Image: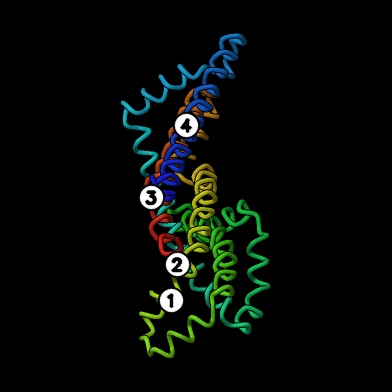
């Protein structure tokens, strides 16, 4: 076995060990939770088995899947809007000092306005409609995308762009082959942080002004002090987030970062 094969074998072994550690840590967490719940016998801390039973009941009725689909659709729309607008402005501000100077004050203001204020204002201005909900989420996320992409645009190697110009590459080939590959790490960072933020803001938006979705259901369960259902929805939502990260975000990140290896 040569050195490369040995290194690959060690890498695979390390990945397997990490997965086992993750599984054991989760098992230990739920085991400890079950033990504490049995000792306390307090309705404010339901056991994992009770939460799992509640989760199954909500799945069987179709209520959970319906509300998850509604929430995910809002997350997807707001994510796409914020990434497109944030990337465009981030590139402009990173490449042109004048544009950056003109918009930097507005950007700082957008970064520091609380999400709750934006949500309330959008509902007052546009009404309790779907457009207001998605707009509020996108407005809260766009500034963070701009900041991340702007730093990526500033870090682009100008010499590579000069080489592309020397070979007379068309603008779209220069964009796809030279410019965007250097922005990929920043775009992925913006996308991952964006999803983490959008998940949370969408729930607040639904809680304040929508009649469906996970956030609305959590508010309903809170009114009835149904902690078991709250935890059931929470773990279902967390499972969806983990699946999106593992099935979508991580493979995309590995694929677009392959050229760096």
Tag 3 and tag 2, C-beta contact below 8 Å: no
Residue indicated by mark 3: 248
Q: Is residue 148 left or right of residue 14?
A: right
Residue indicated by mark 2: 84
Residue indicated by mark 1: 178
| The N terminus, quarter of image | top left
Q: In terms of sequence position, does the residue under pointer 3 or pointer 2 come before the other?
A: 2
Q: In terms of sequence position, does the residue under pointer 4 or pointer 3 come before the other?
A: 4
Instruction: Please tell me the numbered disc located at residue 37.
Output: none
Instruction: Please tell me the numbered disc located at residue 235.
Output: 4
Q: What element carries label 3?
A: helix
Q: Which residue is drawn at 55% across and 69% down?
A: 152
Task: State which mark lies toward you, 1 or 4.
Answer: 1
Query: Which of the pair 105/252 is nearer the observer?
Result: 252
Q: What element carries label 1?
A: helix
Residue 149, quarter of the rendered image: bottom right
Q: Which residue is drawn at 50% across and 25% down?
A: 24
Residue 253, quarter of the rendered image: bottom left
Query: For mark 1, does the 10 Å Cα neighbourhood hold few (<14), some (14 to 19), or many (20 or more) residues?
Result: some
| The C terminus, quarter of image | bottom left
Q: What element carries label 4?
A: helix
Q: Distance between the residues labelled 3 and 2?
A: 18 Å
Query: For mark 4, does the 10 Å Cα neighbourhood hold few (<14), some (14 to 19), or many (20 or more) residues?
Result: some
Q: Is residue 66 left or right of residue 78?
A: left
Tag 4 and tag 2, C-beta contact below 8 Å: no
């Amino acid at each position: 076995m040569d050195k490369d094969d040995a290194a690959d074998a060690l890498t695979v072994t390390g990945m397997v060990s990490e997965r086992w550690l993750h599984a054991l840590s989760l098992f230990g967490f739920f085991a400890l939770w079950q033990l504490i719940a049995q000792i306390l016998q307090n309705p404010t801390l339901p056991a994992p088995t009770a939460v799992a039973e509640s989760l199954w009941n909500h799945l069987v009725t179709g209520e959970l899947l319906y509300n998850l689909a509604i929430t995910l659709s809002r997350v997807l729309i707001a994510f796409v809007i914020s990434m497109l607008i944030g990337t465009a402005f981030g590139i402009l501000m990173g490449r042109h000092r004048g544009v950056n100077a003109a918009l930097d004050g507005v950007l700082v203001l957008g970064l520091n306005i609380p999400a709750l204020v934006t949500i309330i204002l959008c509902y007052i201005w546009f009404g309790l409609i779907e457009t207001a909900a998605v707009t509020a989420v996108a407005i809260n996320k766009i500034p963070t995308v701009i900041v991340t992409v702007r730093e990526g645009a500033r870090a682009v190697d100008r010499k590579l762009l000069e080489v592309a110009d020397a070979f007379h590459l068309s603008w779209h080939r220069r964009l796809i082959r030279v410019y965007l590959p250097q922005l990929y790490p920043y775009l992925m960072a913006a996308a991952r942080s964006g999803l983490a933020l959008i998940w949370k803001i969408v729930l607040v938006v639904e809680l304040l002004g929508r009649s469906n979705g996970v956030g609305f259901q959590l508010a309903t369960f809170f009114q009835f002090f149904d902690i078991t259902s709250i935890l059931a929805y929470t773990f279902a939502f967390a499972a969806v987030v983990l699946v999106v990260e593992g099935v979508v975000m991580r493979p995309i990140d590995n694929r677009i970062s392959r050229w760096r290896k």
